[in-house]
Image: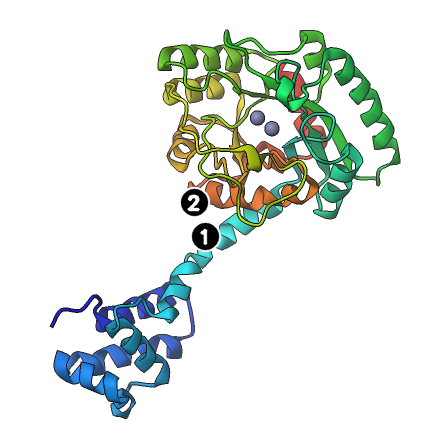
Amino acid sequence: MARARDPIADLRRIAFLLERANEATYRVRAFRSAAKALAGLSAAELTERAGNGTLTELAGVGDVTARCVAESLAGEEPVYLRRLVATEGSDLDAEATALRAALRGDCHTHSDWSDGGSPIEEMALAAVELGHEYLVLTDHSPRLTVARGLTADRLRRQLDHVAQLNAALPEGFRILTGIEVDINADGSLDQDDDLLARLDVVVGSVHSGLKDERSKMTRRMLTAVANPHLDILGHVTGRMVSSRPAGVTGPGDRGHRARTRAESDFDADAVFAACAEHDTAVEINSRPERQDPPKRLIRRALEAGCRFAINTDAHAPGQLDWQRFGCERAALCGVPADRVINTWSAEQLVAWTHDRR
Ligand SMILES: [Zn+2]
Ligand SMILES: [Zn+2]
């Protein structure tokens, strides 16, 4: 008789996952015992007993395990197993949680001065509530006109405004000045050098020509990474893995415009080697529709010796809590906290960016 699933294998799989999650022994034993008791039955008897509800008459088989067997015989993944698989990897969760707890700020955020949905002070207050010690404000640069990129004049005005806001914010919290500067086609940065030099943190990203050929894109990125003003290389591949994440709405959500987009093509090993050489941090962008870089590239950047910044690229206050997504991916790739620049204090971070220039 053909059937879609092997109920004994499902019971064993459940036992294995319970053990790996370090669950109580009696729970594991219930599934192991049931698997053992049922392994002695013929397929016909197993099906008959599941059908007439007499599986539980067998020693070692209880209601929960009998239900798993019935679901499995019906060709469905047992609900119990499905839940376990969904919550698998509790150790890893602990690592991601520890990494998230180690983060003291966010180095890539937007306000309504460019394409974000909220004033700077609202972003800052949300960051305070999240327990951050700092928020780096990185609105867009002039060439990104669709995102109302800031001219040099508007950026200067923003710096004055941030200084005023900082004076009124709770002690122990600071808005750090910054920019998400476009990396131009020739690899130069889309803002005046003297202004870039004044900023606490400079994130640089490619927002155009994402389909350019490999050698051109590699050259462009290598030039940018070698620029002493560039501190963090933003959303490295430019990919979009999904359209708007479920349940996310509201102003400032750039996801609603996002479409699926392939990674841009460049020599990742060369770019990461340059990041390591020039001590430019590689961003782990937490946005659900970006998840950039993909895990295989995070691992290569780690091997290359790069530092990382786990950023939200938040365009609204609630999105500041998306750092945990980036932490999960970083933890999956084994990124240690001491390679992540936003585990530093604001003073350490700013000392690092100024040293680099
Ligand atoms: Zn960007
Ligand atoms: Zn951004």
Question: In the image, what residue occupies the spot 49% across and 54% down?
Answer: 93
Q: Determine whether the residue tagged by mark 1 lies in a helix, strand or loop.
A: helix
Q: Horizontally, is 335 left or right of 266 in the view? A: right
Q: Residue furthest bottom?
A: 57
Q: Which mark is residue 179?
A: none
Q: Nearer the viewer, residue 223 or 112?
A: 112
Which residue does the numbered mark 1 point to in the structure image?
A: 92
Quarter assignment of residue 317: top right
Question: 292 or 114, which lies in front?
Answer: 114
Residue at horizontal 74 percent and vertical 47 percent from the top = 129
Looking at the image, in which quadrant does ligand 1 appear? top right
Q: Give the x, y percent position of residue 139.
A: 68, 25
SS class of the residue under badge 2?
helix
Q: Residue at x 81, y 18 (%)?
A: 157
Q: Is residue 224 visible?
A: yes
Q: Could you tell whether 60 is left or right of 86 in the image?
A: left
Q: Position of residue 92 (x, y in %)?
A: 45, 52
- Which of the 4 image quarters holds residue 321? top right
Left or right: where 254 falls relative to 83 = right
Query: Is the distance from the Cβ of mark 1 to the nearest ligand 2 atom less than 8 Å?
Result: no
Q: Quadrant of residue 281?
A: top right
Q: Is residue 218 above or below residue 89?
A: above
For the N terminus, the image quarter is bottom left
Residue 332 is tagged as 2
Query: Disc 2 vs disc 1: Cβ atoms closer than 8 Å?
Result: yes
Crowd tier of the residue under label 1, counting other residues whose Cα lies within 10 Å: few below 14, some 14–19, many 20 or above: some
Task: Tell me if residue 33 comes above or below residue 14 in the rendering.
Answer: below
- Observer-nearest residue: 37 or 251? 251
Residue at figure coordinates x 74%, y 36% from the top left: 118
* Amino acid type, callout 2: Leu
